[in-house]
């Protein structure tokens, strides 16, 4: 069933606008960040007409796929920009070195530039603007080569160029389609099961989807498929997932550890945009000998986990490692009221499970607890508004063997 371009383009335009507004507030910008802002502006300009057209009409599938892929790359770029900005203003235990953050942004810039080309090509191929010129006269036109030998139809773009390993290319080409940029999650799981001849469980498929669809956009883009595989073959990737093993971060990592700030267990990682809310619980945890690392955004938490991946992987046990997160938090700039992320808790939980971390996760929140029923879909997860339940969760690391379960489930009291 066709998907309306209007809704998808509106969402991606809003994401572009949010990032642009945030960038304008940054006093310091490196060249890579400036170039990223320029590409995002171009993506916004191309999509804006599709987000404001007066009538609702189902769009061509290729253009819809291109917009969804662009949105996926923009979400990741936003996270990396936030991590880069926060690192400059805060001292955090064992965090990514500045050169690693800039490298991530350069990779984002390249992916955004590729998506811009694909987006322009898709607009030209479907002829959407020409077909709807009667509705508007000021839509941006894709610039195509009109020199000798050129045609009005743009040259085809090799979507599989971003997949480095031959068996990964073969899987996407044979089971999904060489001209398909984006596939819905249920269809991807069906094709994966076909490739594996049924020898892969639904639960493993769901964990793989959490990894390939980190931002829960509803499916898998070929660019993210290639990015996650990296130098690994598709077969090795699937076998590793089936065994429940963890893949290291996609990019090479350089970590800066300040003297006297090395990590140790038991370790509690706490994600909240207002640390003052948790002063009592944090003090109690430290009094039990638990090291507490406090992070203020999902983006910061993701980058910190990548920076300390090896340590966390080796200590992924309930008695040695746990996570606490609030459910909704302001993820960008406190001056921008529209940036409250009401899905922050689930996004973080999804990120952890998609990387095959099994450590317990508690969503510790207030009035928004009614929005946390999603914890029931994840292993070793719970939600609560109760300080008593939170303290039980924390003390479970040092009392017994971490085999406590009385905090698990939705809205535990």
Image: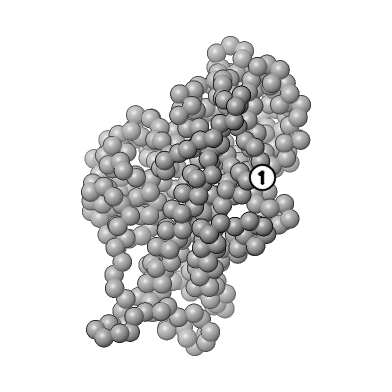
Count the labels in the image: 1
Q: Where is residue 247 in the image (x, y as percent from the top left)?
A: 39, 35
In front: 361, or 30?
A: 30
Asked where in the image residue 33 lies, by quadrant, the reply is bottom right
Asked where in the image residue 28 lies, by quadrant, the reply is bottom right
Give the residue displayed 38% in from the left and 54% down from the top.
223
- Colouring of the image: one colour
User: In the picture provided, is 8 more to the left or to the right than 144?
Assistant: right
Image: 257 above or below 327 = above
User: In the picture provided, is 142 more to the left or to the right than 389?
Assistant: left
Image: 387 above or below 146 = above
User: In the picture provided, is 139 more to the left or to the right than 363?
Assistant: left
Q: Mark 1 points at which residue?
A: 89
- Kind of element beneath mark 1: helix
Q: Quadrant of the N terminus?
A: bottom left
Q: In which quarter of the image is the C terminus?
A: top right
User: In the picture provided, is 413 more to the left or to the right than 358?
Assistant: right
Few, some or many residues within 10 Å of mark 1 (<14, 14–19, 20+): few
Give the residue displayed 24% in from the left and 40% down from the top.
197
Give the residue displayed 30% in from the left and 41% down from the top.
232
Image: 349 above or below 413 = below
Report if residue 377 is visible in the image.
Answer: no
Q: Where is residue 288 in the image (x, y as percent from the top left)?
A: 68, 16
Residue reaching furthest front? Answer: 259
Give the residue displayed 63% in from the left and 30% down from the top.
293
Q: Position of residue 336 (x, y in %)?
A: 71, 57
In front: 116, or 196?
A: 116
Report if residue 400 is visible in the image.
Answer: yes
């Amino acid at each position: 069933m066709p998907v309306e371009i209007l809704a998808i383009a509106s969402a991606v335009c809003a994401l572009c606008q949010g990032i642009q507004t945030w960038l304008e507030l940054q006093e310091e910008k490196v060249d890579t960040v400036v170039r990223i802002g320029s590409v995002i502006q171009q993506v916004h300009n191309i999509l804006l007409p599709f987000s404001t057209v007066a009538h609702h009409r189902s769009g061509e599938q290729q253009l819809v796929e291109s917009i969804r892929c662009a949105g996926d790359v923009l979400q990741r770029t936003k996270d990396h920009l936030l991590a880069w900005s926060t690192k400059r203003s805060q001292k955090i235990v064992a965090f990514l070195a500045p050169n690693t953050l800039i490298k991530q942004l350069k990779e984002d810039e390249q992916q955004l530039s590729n998506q811009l080309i694909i987006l322009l090509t898709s607009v030209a191929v479907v002829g959407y603007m020409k077909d709807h010129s009667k509705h508007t006269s000021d839509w941006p036109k894709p610039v195509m080569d009109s020199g000798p030998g050129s045609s009005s139809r743009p040259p085809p773009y090799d979507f599989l160029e971003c997949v480095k390993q031959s068996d990964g290319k073969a899987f996407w080409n044979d089971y999904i389609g060489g001209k398909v940029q984006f596939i819905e999650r249920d269809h991807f799981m069906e094709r994966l099961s076909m490739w594996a001849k049924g020898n892969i469980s639904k639960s493993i498929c769901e964990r793989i989807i959490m990894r390939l669809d980190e931002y829960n956009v509803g499916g898998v883009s070929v660019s993210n498929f290639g990015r996650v595989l990296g130098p690994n073959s598709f077969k090795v990737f699937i076998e590793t997932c089936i065994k429940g093993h963890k893949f290291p971060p996609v990019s090479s990592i350089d970590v800066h550890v300040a003297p006297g700030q090395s990590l140790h267990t038991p370790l509690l990682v706490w994600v909240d945009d207002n640390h003052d809310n948790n002063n009592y619980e944090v003090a109690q945890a430290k009094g039990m000998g638990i090291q507490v690392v406090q992070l203020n955004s999902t983006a910061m938490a993701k980058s910190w986990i990548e920076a300390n991946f090896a340590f966390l992987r080796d200590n992924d046990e309930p008695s040695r490692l746990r996570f606490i997160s609030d459910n909704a938090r302001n993820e960008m700039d406190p001056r921008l009221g529209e940036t409250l992320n009401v899905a922050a808790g689930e996004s973080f939980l999804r990120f952890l499970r998609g990387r095959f971390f099994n450590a317990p996760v508690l969503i510790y929140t207030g009035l928004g607890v009614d929005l946390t029923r999603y914890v029931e879909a994840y292993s070793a997860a719970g939600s609560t508004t109760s300080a008593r339940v939170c303290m039980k969760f924390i003390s479970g690391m040092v009392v017994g063997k971490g085999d406590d379960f009385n905090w698990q489930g939705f809205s535990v009291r």
